[in-house]
Image: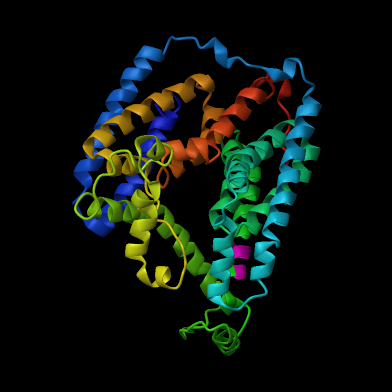
Amino acid sequence: MFKRHPLYLLYLLVIGLVSVGLLYGFGLNHLGKIGFYVLTLTFFYSLFYRVLRNKQWNFIAFDPTRNIKKNHLDFFLLGSIGIFILYHLCFLGQVPFISAVKILDYYQIAFIRQNIIEHDHSFVKYVSAFMIRGIIPFALLYFSITNKKLFFILIPIALFYALSLMQKSLIVSVMIPLIIYSVIDRKYLNSVLYSAIAISGIFILVYTTNPNLRATQEEIRSEMEKNGHLYLPGENMSAAASFLSASIAIYTRVFIATGLAAGYWLDNIPSVYPYTKGCGYRFLAPAIGCDFNDFDYSHIIYNATYKKEAKIGLKGTITVANFVYDYANFGYIGLFYSACITALFFNFLGKIFDNNFKWIISINALFIFWLSSGALHTLLLSGGWIITIILFIIFKSVLTAEKNDFEPAL
């Protein structure tokens, strides 16, 4: 069952995780909406699966490797990654995590992290998302199978870049396709090693973003007060305690936070904030005469929920599951069409990947999980998913050829 419908069943698991947090924070208040969405999703998924099961989509058989040498494509892929990373760090004017490790002021570290993504240069912002969420994870998996030398060149570059962006999730995201592929391919030692690399990266960021691991409370107080920031005394945790705290935070993020975020939206829409009627879609708002910023509930609800952080100038968002965005726009009608579009898209992916369990899971599983805190169209257009799909189509013949049954990279 799982091998025949992996994306659908993974997505049900994601909805289950959202429901756990929703139950934890809001009781049974919103489970009716979740139930309606799941039933509609299941109906449309089954319908599209039956209709499309025997259809042949020959236009997907695009193979540029027939006309371009594989080595040329490989070096172009690696070179594009390296050039953009260098450009991005030059654009930022610093390597953020190296700058942060020298600072003892919590607020300054928070502003460094904010500065990475809060700028007006759309090209850098979008290409960075394409790179770290789509191109780099795919390239690591691709090179680990087809070109060990390029794999060993890319992996330290990828990890350094992920650390530089100072988000724990990005360290994990670049390694997840490798981990999943290794497990499916029964290369368990590889999967353990890749997992250890990801966990080590998380702990490096914990060390970087927690001054109490690097200084005494008096030193931290002195620097914060010198910068005009209020110091709130607290327990000076040991490294072990901080790492435990980080582990708890990751557990909370997976099992609780996504549901709580959904609850903040569902509790306030439409009782406090009205349905946006299409104005909540950034790509659609200008076409229907709306100012998206007036309906950007991810920022609006963040400011209403985290008033202290917003007051000192920290900008944040409360991002929610795919279907919650559609509910925020059109209520139950939004849930209905969200289920329809998602079901159709999963079947479309099945065709692209020839329902090959190994590849469809290795490459798409992380994006399915991100549907717990992101809209489908956002993940596709600016989150790197569509780029990853295109890369698979380009390199499909190389990855799926039996003659390329290479030894694993490690």
- Camera-nearest residue between 153 and 232: 232
Where is 163 relative to 344, above or below?
A: below
In the rendered image, residue 165, in percent from the top left (x then y), is placed at 61, 56
**Prevailing secondary structure class for the magenta stretch in the rendered image:** helix
In the rendered image, residue 114, in percent from the top left (x then y), is placed at 54, 62
- Camera-nearest residue between 323 and 92: 92
Quadrant location of the N terminus in the rendered image: top left
Query: Which residue is found at the position 35% from the left and 39% from the top?
Result: 289
Query: Which residue is found at the position 69% from the left and 48% from the top?
Result: 158
In the rendered image, residue 102, in percent from the top left (x then y), is placed at 67, 74
Where is 225 relative to 132, above or below?
A: below
* Left or right for 13, reference 95: left
Residue furthest out toward the front? 289
Q: How many marks?
A: 0
Query: Which residue is found at the position 48% from the left and 69% from the top?
Result: 245
* Left or right for 375, reference 110: left
Where is 233 relative to 376, above or below?
A: below
Q: Specify the segment rendered in magenta.
A: 203-208
Query: Which residue is found at the position 49% from the left and 63% from the top?
Result: 247
- Camera-nearest residue between 367 and 190: 367
Where is 358 relative to 354, above or below?
A: below
In the rendered image, residue 97, in percent from the top left (x then y), is placed at 65, 64
- Camera-nearest residue between 185 and 62: 62
Quadrant location of the C terminus in the rendered image: top right
